[in-house]
Image (tube, grey):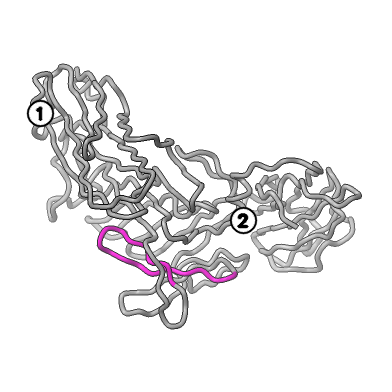
Amino acid sequence: MSFWLLLLIFPAVLSAQTKMVIRPSLITQCTTNKLGRARIAWAASTGPARVRVGSATGPSLTGPVAATGESETGDWVTDGMMFVLIDSGGAELARVTAQVQCGGNPDPLASALATSTYFPLQIGNVWVYRINSRVTTSSYITRRVTRTEIIGGKLWFIVADGSVETPYRTDELGRVFQLDSRGNEFLWLDPTPTPDPAATLKVLYKGIPFRNALGAFQDSLQHQISGLLSENGTFVRGIGFISKSQNLNTGSSGGFSESLDLVWARIGPNLRFGTPTIGIELSVESLDFNVSGNAVTNCAVPCYFPACGIGPGADPPNTYKPCFQAGVRLHDPAPFESARTLAIDLLDSTSGAVFHTTQQLTTGDEQEDGVIYQQVPLYTAPNAPVPPGTYQVRATVDSSTAQTTLRVR
């Protein structure tokens, strides 16, 4: 029996750390008697705990169990049926209520995400991230699953980030393993109900809604790394790694280190997250930029830690480097037969080039229906914005060109 898996959380009043969810939150697959089946998951601050049906004194779904866990019902769940989590003394910790609508038509996207993992690995998957760090602001990196390899008798998926390749694999429990530079396997992420503490990414909580510029998603996982370089981040089931923020925990050089945010993804042959693509398409974040009023994104690199002067990276205080984001979206009905070059230009009213950059596009299927992001400067030098006027932004691939007009004031 397959389910439409969405998560709906009814928080307990007694403990902000106690969570309880029912999967799916809307049961649409039923028996002939219009009864459904569900999986109840819980996470309490302490154990043991117990799940009862109907009320805190109703029939037991589970015996005394660990503070975190899951249990599946039989085909007997009715609409409005309540499940209650209690502690060892019988006090209520949390409750969830089943919603049953037999014969419903679940959303195909939600179904696809619900049946996937927190880190989907398939050749052709692509993730584009916006990156901020001590040496760059609003730049972009692309990660792709390029191929598979049999290493040590196991199937590994190779994820390429530029010239850097990292092997990953998942097991039947959804745990994610990685190979280090010496070929040693280690557990990277464990999203199971009782995560292995040896995993690199420590799971804080999972199964909660998450929203960002790509949309609203029902099942996310929050992770953390502690140490000299600490990290907090998010995975979304069916999409993968969504965001992270890193901090360097040292003295005068401590503070913000790096952040990544997903801006576009292609998962499998059918799922796209971002703006749909037809032909070559150019977009900019605005058509009117007020550089004189400092109302434009400043791509100067701030000083994130006290002793900025001891190393390179940050711009001097009060540096203004106005810039904007340009997005070029491509669609080719067939893989590229040869390497292609993307050119992005910022032209003034006389068609003079204020900014010009080129990028070699990857040969192969991974560039089909691709997306490329580029930071475009609106300055000729730090604290020297371009003069007011009308400018053209132009993107060119082979003989295909797209351009748009913007105003700078």
Tell me the residue that label 2 is attached to: 115
Which quadrant is the C terminus positioned in? top left
Which of the labelled discs sits on residue 1, or is there none? none
Residue at image point 51% right, 55% down: 222
Looking at the picture, how far across and down is residue 168, in whole percent?
43, 68
Which of the labelled discs sits on residue 384, or is there none? 1
Q: Is residue 120 magenta?
A: no
Q: Real-space Cα distance between discs 2 and 1? A: 52 Å
Circle 1: is it few (<14), some (14-19), or many (20+) Cα within 10 Å? some
Q: Which residues are magenta?
A: 156-172
Residue at image point 22% right, 25% down: 294
Residue at image point 77% right, 46% down: 28
**Mark 2 residue element:** loop
Q: Residue furthest bottom?
A: 152
Amino acid of disc 2? Thr
Looking at the picture, how far across and down is residue 360, in whole percent?
21, 49
Looking at the picture, how far across and down is residue 10, in whole percent?
70, 45
In front here: 36 or 338? 338
Looking at the picture, how far across and down is residue 121, in whole percent?
47, 61
**Mark 1 residue element:** strand
Q: Please report whichever mark, 2 or 1, sits nearer to the chain's N-terminal start.
A: 2
Residue at image point 37% right, 61% down: 146
On screen, 276 above or below 67? above
Quadrant of the rendered image containing residue 63 = bottom right
Q: Relative to 128, is 299 on the left or the right?
A: left
On screen, 199 above or below 328? below
